[in-house]
Image (cartoon, rainbow, N blue to C red):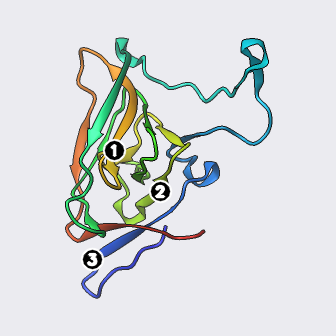
């Protein structure tokens, strides 16, 4: 994570880092076609590349596949972050469609269940990539760079599965990618 704090200790700007499986592993799985050949299918006209399975059937949940259409930010970066959410009964998968790009902001969970907002991280999810957030991962609601359609696979169930918490004032994120 790249970030800075002002003299007051409240102003903090996160800089997005490239999405990589190792850096993102504490929060979820990176979905993309790996290097190398997959399993030949359809009489050899395609390659199958299996991805980690989502965890969406907790507490009697069923898969819910949707497309979220976003409008993108109303102004240039950096953007103010206000809220984190988590889903304790199932994972969430986000796959930008077309040439869309998402910005995923995540935080580890402290032993008492709250997010560790001091160690927020931001990742750029570009074309050809997606992410599955592990069950219970604290994350900012969906952010896209510009208007976009994003395929979302999540749990649907009788029990609502969305816990929200406010972020400290003065938390911002930039779409500028920091090379790690």
Give the residue at mark 3: 11
Q: Residues within 10 Å of mark 1 (few under 14, many from 20)?
A: many
> Of marks 2 and 3, which one's residue comes earlier in the chain?
3
Can residue 114 be spotted in the picture? no
Query: Disc 1 vs disc 2: Cβ atoms closer than 8 Å?
Result: no
Q: Residues within 10 Å of mark 2 (few under 14, many from 20)?
A: many
In this rendering, the label closer to the viewer, 2 or 3: 2
Mark-to-mark CA distance, 1 and 2: 17 Å
Name above or below for residue 109 compared with residue 158: below
Mark-to-mark CA distance, 1 and 3: 29 Å
Mark-to-mark CA distance, 2 and 3: 20 Å
Left/right placement of residue 17 relative to residue 106 reads right
Name above or below for residue 4 compared with residue 31: below
Left/right placement of residue 57 relative to residue 178 reads left
Residue at 77% from the left image edge and 22% from the top image edge: 39
The numbered mark at residue 88 is: none
Left/right placement of residue 4 relative to residue 11 reads right
Give the residue at mark 1: 148
Q: Secondary structure at mark 1?
A: strand
Give the residue at mark 2: 123
Q: Position of residue 14 (x, y in %)?
A: 39, 68
**Residue closest to the far front:** 45
Q: Quadrant of the C terminus?
A: bottom right
> Of marks 1 and 2, which one's residue comes earlier in the chain?
2
Can residue 66 be spotted in the picture? yes
Query: Disc 2 vs disc 3: Cβ atoms closer than 8 Å?
Result: no
Q: Quadrant of residue 70?
A: top left
């Amino acid at each position: 994570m790249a970030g800075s704090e002002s003299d007051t200790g409240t102003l903090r700007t996160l800089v997005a880092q490239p999405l990589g499986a190792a850096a993102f592993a504490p929060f979820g799985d990176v979905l993309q076609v790996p290097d190398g050949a997959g399993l030949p299918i359809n009489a050899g006209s395609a390659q199958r590349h299996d991805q980690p399975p989502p965890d969406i059937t907790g507490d009697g949940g069923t898969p819910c596949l949707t497309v979220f259409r976003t409008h993108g930010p109303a102004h240039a970066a950096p953007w103010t972050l206000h809220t984190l959410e988590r889903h304790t009964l199932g994972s969430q998968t986000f796959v930008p469609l077309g040439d869309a790009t998402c910005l995923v902001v995540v935080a580890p969970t402290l032993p008492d269940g709250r997010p560790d907002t001091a160690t927020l991280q931001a990742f750029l999810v570009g074309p050809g990539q997606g992410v599955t957030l592990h069950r219970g991962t604290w994350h900012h609601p969906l952010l896209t760079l510009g208007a976009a359609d994003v395929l979302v696979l999540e749990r649907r169930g009788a029990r609502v599965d969305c816990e929200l918490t406010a972020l400290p004032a003065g938390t911002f994120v930039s779409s500028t990618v920091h090379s790690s």
